[in-house]
């Protein structure tokens, strides 16, 4: 019975979406709060670097969440809020950085690595196949092979 209860508690904890949002940060208007949450989910926590500011409980993430809400209350559109934060912290603050000349390597590196890996495998198997092919037998070698075959059949 205790295992079952432990399992249910673990299941609830694992399926719950992690949110570091504090009650005093929540906006009164549900529509504005939803906008703030959508923006926060797309901004990277600069301390954690692998979490959005919506999920992080770092102090800087809280400051960024408050800044997002402050800009929304001031009447900024979602794009203006994001561009304001990007102007302060750079493209790194975005969880999905834009495709431009500064982030070209970031976006193309998986394709380049895949291409290099594929080329490596092609050369490896091509070399292995070429090493496995033996030259044809000469006439004396063929006679020796025939003699060995005859001896085996007797």
Image: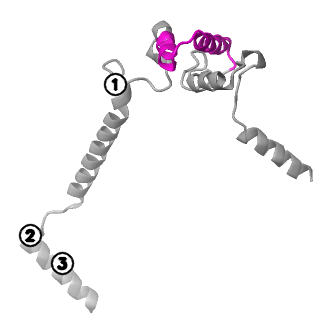
Residue 113 in sight from this viewpoint: yes
Please identify, in this view, whether the residue under mark 3 or under mark 1 is nearer the observer: 1
Region rendered in magenta:
57-86
The first of marks 3 and 2 along the sequence is 2
Left or right for 124, reference 64? left
Between 38 and 129, the one lying in front of the other is 38
Q: Give the residue number, with chain letter if any, for mark 3.
A: 145
Residue 118 location, x and y as percent?
Answer: 30, 45
Q: Quadrant of residue 109?
A: top left
x, y (%) of residue 102? Answer: 34, 17
- Local SS, label 2: loop
> Left of 18 or right of it: where is 88?
left
Distance from disc 2 to disc 1, alpha carbons, whole Å, reads: 55 Å
Work out whether mark 3 precedes mark 1 in sequence or the reverse, and give the earlier one: 1
Give me the disc on residue 58: none
User: Which dot marks residue 105?
Assistant: 1
User: Above or below — where is 19 with respect to 28?
Assistant: below
Residue sticking out furthest to the right: 1
Dot 3, how many residues are within 10 Å of its Cα: few (below 14), some (14-19), or many (20+)? few
In this figure, what is the number of numbered marks? 3
Q: Quadrant of the C terminus?
A: bottom left
Q: Is residue 110 magenta?
A: no
The secondary element bearing badge 3 is classed as helix
Residue 146 % position (x, y): 16, 82
Mark 2 lies on residue: 138
């Amino acid at each position: 019975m205790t295992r079952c209860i432990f399992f249910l508690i673990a299941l609830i904890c694992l399926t719950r979406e992690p949110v570091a949002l504090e009650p005093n940060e929540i906006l009164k208007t549900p529509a504005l709060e939803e906008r703030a949450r959508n923006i926060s989910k797309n901004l990277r926590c600069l301390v954690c670097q692998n979490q959005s500011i919506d999920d992080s409980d770092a102090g800087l993430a809280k400051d960024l969440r408050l800044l997002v809400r402050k800009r929304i209350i001031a009447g900024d559109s979602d794009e203006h809020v994001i561009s304001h934060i990007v102007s302060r912290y750079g493209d790194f603050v975005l969880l999905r950085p834009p495709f431009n000349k500064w982030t070209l390597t970031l976006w193309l590196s998986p394709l380049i690595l895949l291409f290099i890996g594929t080329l490596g495998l092609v050369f490896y198997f091509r070399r292995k196949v070429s090493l496995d092919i033996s030259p044809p037998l000469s006439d004396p070698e063929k006679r020796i092979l025939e003699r060995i075959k005859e001896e085996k059949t007797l």
